[in-house]
Image (cartoon, grey):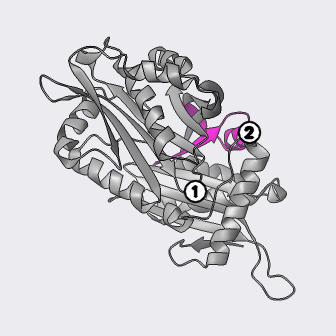
Amino acid sequence: MVREWDPRTASSAEIASLLDTLNAVLAADLPQDPPWREISMREYLAEVMPGERRISWVAQAEKAADGSPGAILGHVHVLLLGDIGVLEVLVHPSARRTGLGRSLVLTAARRAYQEGFQSIGVEVVGDTPAIAFYEALGFSKEFVETRSVLDLSGVDWAELAEMATGIGAGYHLEFHPGGPPDELIDAYARAKAEVRDVEDGELRPSSYDPQRLRDSLDCLHRRGMKPYIVLALHEQTGEVAGLTEVVVPAQHPTRADQYDTIVVQDHRGYGIDRAIKARMLMELRSTEAQLAEVQTWNAQANEAMLKVNAELGYRPDREWCEYSIDVAELVHRIDAGR
């Protein structure tokens, strides 16, 4: 049975059952990824940015003989933002190839269509069954990134310390756990806006407006995700010349997520990119005792950043693909195949 589901009011048992399904999917498809924990899981599922909505459904097994609720075997949510709905679908490995995944996608697609959205996107991990699943539904690949993972146990920390100081004269680095101070938000936003890459993927948009940056940081904290920022400041002007962002989620605190790394065009060529990422790793080593790995995503055409990551010790892991489809076409295709 597929039913609409609100993580804000769901029982603790339902949250735990959904987490079990998520970890079963990770064990089957991404066995090297760390399992998720229940800490702040409800908040992770419920909290969104202002102006965005997330609508969720679950597929639950029949009640057990003793009357206890059945396990959650599938979950889908659609995040409605801008002019696109973004899907995320989980199906327990034991329930795959039963039509459950198609039913979940159809349910979310119908709601997106009713809400007036014209397209749906989804992130799909390379070398997993999800690739064939979405392509069979008619989704088209729009964008590909490479995920790379850094194993902190293999880092040469003395060499990394040298990298962190290898920045040109006239710049200094600052570390800001929790996010940049408010007096630097405007400069921070200008740095992000100036180098906005029109080829970036649309499903994980960055924030380029000062207030939206504040909202984004607040949302991260509410979801149980701790942001860390390293800034390169131009001493003569006080402007943000470069920045790098890493988030440590309470749900998987042994592996951090790299967000944006940006160097403003006029300040390139001074070693800022490598220095800010090296400084970040040094700070994380001191502040996050549980941390074992950092994962990052890069467009395959971004050779400069891929080179920096390789120098820091990151190793390519998998492709991370963005797929999309017209909503009306998706609903028609699934209905026609039922």
- Mark 2 or mark 1, which is nearer the start of the sequence? 2
Name the image quarter holding residue 105: bottom right
**Residue sitting at 55 percent across and 29 percent down?**
145
Mark 2 — residue? Answer: 128
Mark 1 is surrounded, within 10 Å at the Cα level, by few (under 14), some (14 to 19) or many (20 or more) other residues, namely some
Residues drawn in magenta:
118-143
Residue 311 as seen in the image, left or right of residue 189:
right
Residue type at mark 2: give it: Thr
Between 223 and 54, the one lying in front of the other is 223
Q: Residue furthest top?
A: 269
The front one of 275 and 214 is 275
User: Position of 191 compared to 73: left or right?
Assistant: left
Helix, strand or loop status at disc 2 = loop
Q: Residues within 10 Å of mark 2 (few under 14, many from 20)?
A: few
Relative height, residue 116 to residue 190 (above, below): below
Q: Is residue 120 magenta?
A: yes
Between 146 and 288, the one nearer to me in the picture: 288
Measure the C-alpha gap from mark 1 to mark 2: 22 Å
Instruction: Check the picture and name the quadrant holding the C terminus.
Output: bottom right
Question: Where is residue 126 shown, x and y percent of the image?
Answer: 68, 34
Q: Are marks 1 and 2 in contact (CB under 8 Å)?
A: no
Residue 201 shows in this picture: no
Image coordinates of residue 267 in percent, x first then y, are 25, 17
Q: Is residue 214 left or right of residue 82?
A: left
Q: Left or right? Give the position of 45 relative to 61.
A: left
Q: Which residue is mark 1?
A: 251
User: Which quadrant of the view contains residue 199?
Assistant: top left
Q: Tag 1: residue type?
A: Gln
Q: Is residue 44 magenta?
A: no
Residue 220 x, y percent position in the rendering: 41, 54
> Image quadrant of residue 215?
bottom left
